[in-house]
Amino acid sequence: MRFLHITHRWREYLQLIIITLWRDFTDRSDDDNFEIWVATQNRCRRA
């Protein structure tokens, strides 16, 4: 159970890193859409 919790945390950190890299590559207003997409993914996963 503890291992799963750590893995979930790791996935969140990895996602943050990906978002940061994505922002560096695409410096456009697409960031908002990407953030909304990520938020929906998280909501679906937790439900």
Image (spheres, grey):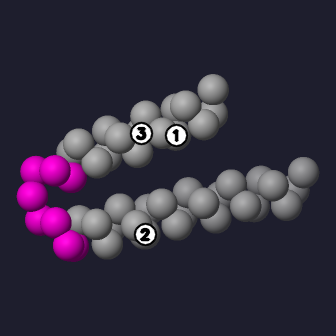
Instruction: Tell me which amino acid carries mark 1.
Output: Asn
Q: Quadrant of the C terminus?
A: top right
Tell me if residue 3 comes above or below residue 34 in the rendering: below
Residue at 63% in and 33% down:
46
Q: What number is the disc on residue 39?
A: 3
Earlier residue among tags 1 and 2: 2
Residue at 31% in and 46% down:
35
Looking at the image, residue 29 sits to the left or right of residue 11; the answer is left
Residue stretch in magenta: 24-31
Instruction: Tell me which amino acid carries mark 3.
Output: Ala
Tell me if residue 18 comes above or below residue 4 in the rendering: below
Marks 3 and 1 close (CB-CB < 8 Å): yes
Looking at the image, residue 28 sits to the left or right of residue 45; the answer is left
**Residue identified by numbered label 1:** 42
Name the element at disc 2: helix
Marks 2 and 3 close (CB-CB < 8 Å): no
Earlier residue among tags 2 and 3: 2
State yes or no: residue 26 in magenta.
Answer: yes
**Residue identified by numbered label 2:** 17
Residue farthest to the right, as pictured: 1
Q: What number is the disc on residue 1?
A: none
Residue at 65% in and 58% down:
9
Marks 1 and 2 close (CB-CB < 8 Å): no
Residue 26: image quadrant is: bottom left
Instruction: Tell me which amino acid carries mark 2.
Output: Ile
State yes or no: residue 18 in magenta.
Answer: no
Name the element at disc 1: helix
Residue farthest to the top, as pictured: 47
**Real-space Cα distance between discs 1 and 2?**
15 Å
Q: Position of residue 14 (x, y in %)?
A: 52, 66
**Real-space Cα distance between discs 2 and 3?**
15 Å
Q: Position of residue 36 (x, y in %)?
A: 32, 39
